[in-house]
């Protein structure tokens, strides 16, 4: 018996919403960490900054990829 049809998969709207939430969290964390780089005694590792930039870009690409299509205009 094939059970693949019974597997739950999230809708594109839910995936887009999760990507937007992840993007907002990772980008806000990045924004909060950047001023620490310019202060005296900064202890933020550069790989943390690079990782947050990559994570933000991945969430932005995911939100763009899974974005639901808008209904087409009926020009008739």
Image (spheres, rainbow, N blue to C red):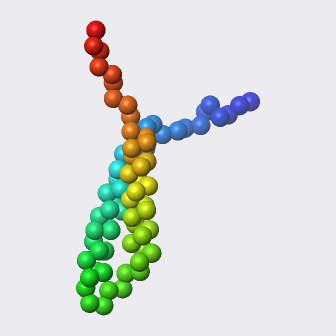
Query: Farthest residue in the top direction?
Result: 76
Foreground of the two, 29 or 60:
60
Q: Residue at x 62, y 31 (%)?
A: 5
**Residue drawn at (39%, 44%) of the image:** 64
The N terminus appears in which quarter of the rendering? top right
Place of residue 70 in the rendered image (x, y in percent of width and height, measured from the top left): 33, 29
Image location of residue 12, percent across then percent down: 43, 37
- Would residue 15 be seen by someone viewing this image from the given angle? yes
Q: Position of residue 6 (x, y in %)?
A: 61, 33
Find residue 55 and report its horizontal and vertical position in percent: 43, 61
Q: Is residue 39 above or below residue 67?
A: below
Q: Of all residues shown, which one is farthest toward the bottom?
A: 41
State whether residue 36 is above or below residue 58: below
Q: How many marks?
A: 0
Q: Nearer the viewer, residue 6 or 39?
A: 39
Q: Is residue 32 left or right of residue 8?
A: left
In this orientation, does residue 14 appear?
no
Quadrant location of the C terminus in the rendered image: top left
Q: Nearer the viewer, residue 1 or 45?
A: 45
Relative to 21, is 1 above or below?
Answer: above
State the residue at coordinates (39%, 39%): 67
Report which quarter residue 14 is drawn in: top left
Q: Is residue 42 above or below residue 68?
A: below
């Amino acid at each position: 018996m094939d059970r693949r049809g019974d597997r739950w998969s999230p809708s594109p709207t839910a995936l887009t919403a999760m990507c937007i939430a992840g993007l907002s969290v990772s980008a806000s964390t990045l924004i909060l960490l950047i001023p620490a780089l310019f202060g005296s005694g900064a202890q933020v590792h550069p790989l943390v900054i690079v990782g947050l930039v990559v994570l933000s870009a991945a969430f932005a690409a995911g939100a763009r990829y899974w974005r639901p299509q808008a209904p087409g205009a009926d020009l008739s």
